[in-house]
Image (spheres, rainbow, N blue to C red):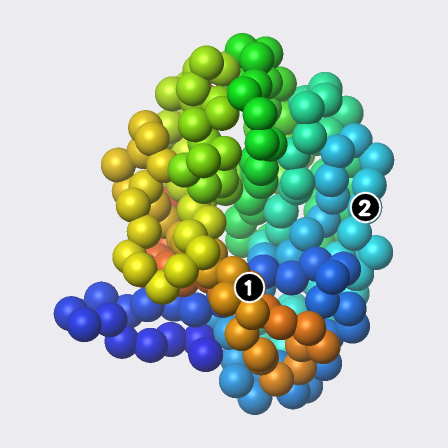
Amino acid sequence: MSQMQNGGNNMMYTGLTVSHYNGVIDFKSLSKNRPAFIIAKASEHDALKDAYYRDNASRSLEYGIPFGAYHFWRSKSGLSQADNFLSMVKPTKIFTYWLDYEIKSASPYDEVTQMIVFIHKVYEQVGLLPCFYTNRNFGANLRKAGIERLVSLPLAIAEYNWMFPKPVYPWLSWVMYQVCDNQSVPGLPSSAEIVYSYHSPDQINTLCTDVSRMV
């Protein structure tokens, strides 16, 4: 699973996103078809914590699988959401994290402002900028909120088919894209969400530690 050839000379890295919905992962079975990375849900809103996150983190690193996290954003204080996320990720070693935006209605201008508060607080504690995760429909709901203020961040896009995805406005390219294809993966009790990238985990980490991308 970890790598497959693109039609050209670029290498495509294949990873997974997981959460409590996947249950207890059998990492011994998973490691036989080793993903290039795992990105696991850590937190949501200002109090929800994923009960499987810490076990997923420790087991991924035990098996040498680069590990990342994501926070599921809700319309709330950026500071309180950052505190919730940090309470989960600070004890773990992550190469990247996603700020996951999936709100179905138009967001006010303050939404992006609160995201920036979140981003700065997390950067102060763990030295990482996020990949901003959304799809084109959700991203359109941030137009009036000033989504352009986030464009320096790497983009992770949700694309629910196998076609080469177009980026979310105003980004010109993406770094990772996720396919929700209900694929069966040995070691996962439930169907998997696959993530593809032309960047290795080390290259993604370099993008997320580049302070010139700060919003």
What amino acid is found at the position of numbered circle 1 in the picture?
Glu
> Farthest left residue?
8
What amino acid is found at the position of numbered circle 2 in the picture?
Lys
Q: Nearer the viewer, mark 2 or mark 1?
A: 1
The residue closer to the viewer here, 114 or 88, is 114
Query: What is the spatial separation of the Cα atoms under label 2 and label 1, in whole angstroms?
Result: 20 Å
Q: Which residue is mark 1?
A: 193
Residue shown at the point (70%, 58%) measured from the top left = 19
Could you tell me residue 38's position as x and y percent?
57, 64
Could you tell me residue 191's position as x and y percent?
62, 72
Is residue 93 visible from the viewing direction of this image?
Answer: no
Is the residue 14 above or below the residue 80 in the image?
A: below
Image quarter in which the C terminus is found: top left
Provide the secondary structure element on which disc 1 rests: strand
Residue shown at the point (34%, 45%) measured from the top left = 174
Image quarter in which the N terminus is found: bottom left
Residue shown at the point (37%, 28%) measured from the top left = 151
Is the residue 85 above or below the residue 200 in the image?
A: above
